Each structure stands twice: as C-alpha cells, then as structure tokens.
Image: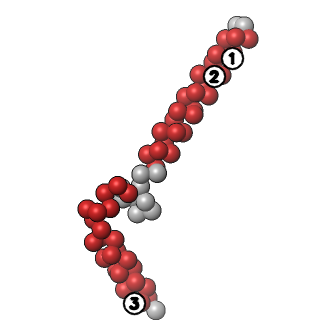
C-alpha cells in the first residue's frame, strides 16, 4: 500500500473519532448531575426542591 492509502485510513479513523466525541459531548451536555434534561427543568422544578429538602432531612437524621 502506498503512503496515500495509509494517510486516507488515518484520516477516516480520526474523523470518526472526532465525530463520536462531538456527538457524545453534545448529548452529555443536555443533562445535569441528577441525569435530568436541562431543557425540561420547568416540568419538574418542584422535584428539585423536594430532592434538596429530602437530602437535608436525611443529613439531619444522620447527625
């Protein structure tokens, strides 16, 4: 195989890796720490408050 063939294979692998990384990071950026969609916060905003208060209650009970 010639140098051009090796270069072509390298470029295809690099392009695939870069595309996969960009798509994965774009997908992961849509979620918060609790694995909830950031763009749907309004639909479960009350859950955020209750989750935080439940954690505080659990911490208080542990003390």
Gap between marks 1 and 2, in whole Å?
Answer: 6 Å
- Left of 22 or right of it: where is 44? left
What secondary structure is found at the residue carrying circle 3?
Answer: helix
Q: Is there any visible trace of residue 60 in the rendered image?
A: yes
Q: Please, what secondary structure does the residue beneath circle 2 have?
A: helix
Residue at 63% from the left image edge and 22% from the top image edge: 11
When the figure is inspected, residue 40 is found, relative to residue 11, above or below; the finding is: below
Q: CA distance from mark 2 to mark 3?
A: 58 Å
Q: Residue 57's x, y, as percent? A: 37, 86
User: Are the residues tagged 1 and 2 within 8 Å (C-beta)?
Assistant: yes
Residue picked out by circle 1:
7
- In the picture of the structure, the residue carrying the numbered disc 2 is 11
Position above or below: 51 against 29: below
Q: Position of residue 37 (x, y in %)?
A: 36, 55
Q: Pointer 3: what residue?
A: 61
Q: Locate the N terminus and report the quarter of the image it occupies.
A: top right
The residue drawn where x is 38% and y is 57% is 38
The residue furthest right is 3
Q: Secondary structure at mark 1?
A: helix
- In the visual, does 54 lie left or right of 9? left
């Amino acid at each position: 195989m010639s140098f051009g063939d090796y270069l072509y294979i390298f470029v295809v692998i690099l392009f695939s890796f870069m595309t996969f990384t960009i798509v994965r990071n774009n997908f992961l950026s849509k979620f918060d720490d609790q694995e909830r969609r950031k763009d749907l916060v309004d639909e479960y905003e009350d859950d955020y408050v209750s989750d935080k208060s439940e954690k505080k209650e659990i911490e208080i009970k542990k003390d």
